[in-house]
Image (cartoon, grey):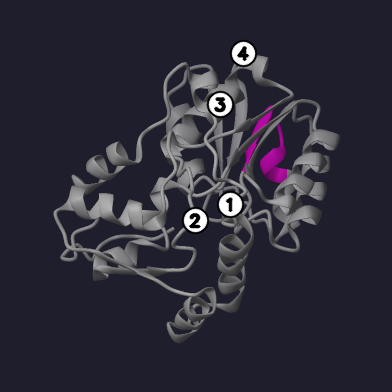
Amino acid sequence: MKKKILVLGSTGKTGRRVAERLKNNPDVELRLGSRSEEIPFDWENPQTWSKILNGIDSVYITFQPDLAVPFAADAIENFSRLATESGVEKMVLLSGRGEKEAQVCEEIVKKNAKNWTIVRASWFNQNFSESFFLDPILHGIVALPRAEALEPFTDADDIADVVTKVLLDDNHNGKTYELTGPRLLTFKDCVNEIALASGRNITFQPLSLEDYKQMLRDYQVPEDHIWLVNYLFEEVLDGRNASVTHDIEKVLARKAREFTAYAEETAQTGIWNPENKDHEIS
């Protein structure tokens, strides 16, 4: 009998990858959760929740924009309770490493789910190729605060491999995994590696957090996005995550992907070439 799995955020960085890994599995019936699907899902519209949960056995929960935002806990409470009432047997939550608000959501899932696995991660490698650092890289100058902060950047493909594994293997029920890359890097280190891999001259410019927020306002970035960026730089990059774990190796029986390997492989796609204007940020 096929396991019916719902992947929320199925167009996002990890959700898309998890869906790709599950779609050809003969033992899985996959349902995608996004606003653009035939059965739409929207965190801000609870009326969309019941139908997409109908008949589902397991759910991969990713929350947009981040579990740190003020309405996240209520949404996770209501969704996870409804999921269990609808017959869902297992929930896998993508949580934020070092985010106390995210850990509140973890406890909610643990309370409401019949079975659960928590997967914590922080900054992704793919923030440089599929998210808000891509445009600065294309322009050849990356200006960011917290220049001295060390972060074990984690690859989204590693996260997706772990999530897929724990969705399918009940031996991971009741476990919390903290996923990191294999070494600590500063933002400048990352930019230098990307410059080397892409053969481009890319400058890193340290900024104060206040100057960075003002720069975002000058570019007319929405205030709710600026709030989240401020939270991530001010709270999460204070050194609390400046350590490496081996949970990826524990789950997958292989080492986590190196940032250098990510940079070299991504450079081959041409995404960091300034001439390539057809990139899509998600």
Counting from the top left corner in percent of width and height, residue 76 is at: 76, 49
Q: Which residue is mark 1?
A: 239
Q: Quadrant of residue 72?
A: bottom right
Mark before the other along the chain sequence, 4 or 3: 4
How far apart are the two marked residues, 3 and 2, measured between alpha carbons? Answer: 22 Å
Contact, CB < 8 Å: mark 2 with mark 1?
yes
Q: Which residues make up the magenta segment?
A: 51-61
How far apart are the two marked residues, 2 and 1, measured between alpha carbons? Answer: 7 Å
Q: Quadrant of residue 42?
A: bottom right
Q: Bin the neighbour count of mark 1 within 10 Å (Cα to Cα): few under 14, some 14-19, many 20 and up.
A: few
Q: Secondary structure at mark 2?
A: loop
Q: Which residue is mark 4?
A: 1
Label 3 is placed on what type of residue?
A: Asp
Q: Is residue 57 found left or right of 273 in the rendered image?
A: right
Contact, CB < 8 Å: mark 1 with mark 4?
no
Label 2 is placed on what type of residue?
A: Ala
Mark before the other along the chain sequence, 3 or 1: 1
For discs 1 and 4, the disc positioned in front in the rendered view: 1
Mark before the other along the chain sequence, 4 or 2: 4
* 253 relative to 41, above or below: above
Q: Which residue is mark 3?
A: 247
Residue plotted at (59% across, 69% down) = 230
How far apart are the two marked residues, 4 and 2, measured between alpha carbons? Answer: 48 Å
For discs 3 and 2, the disc positioned in front in the rendered view: 2
Label 4 is placed on what type of residue?
A: Met
* 199 relative to 249, above or below: below
* Mark number, residue 139: none
Residue plotted at (65% across, 20% down) = 172
Q: Secondary structure at mark 4?
A: loop
Residue 270 in view (yes/no):
no
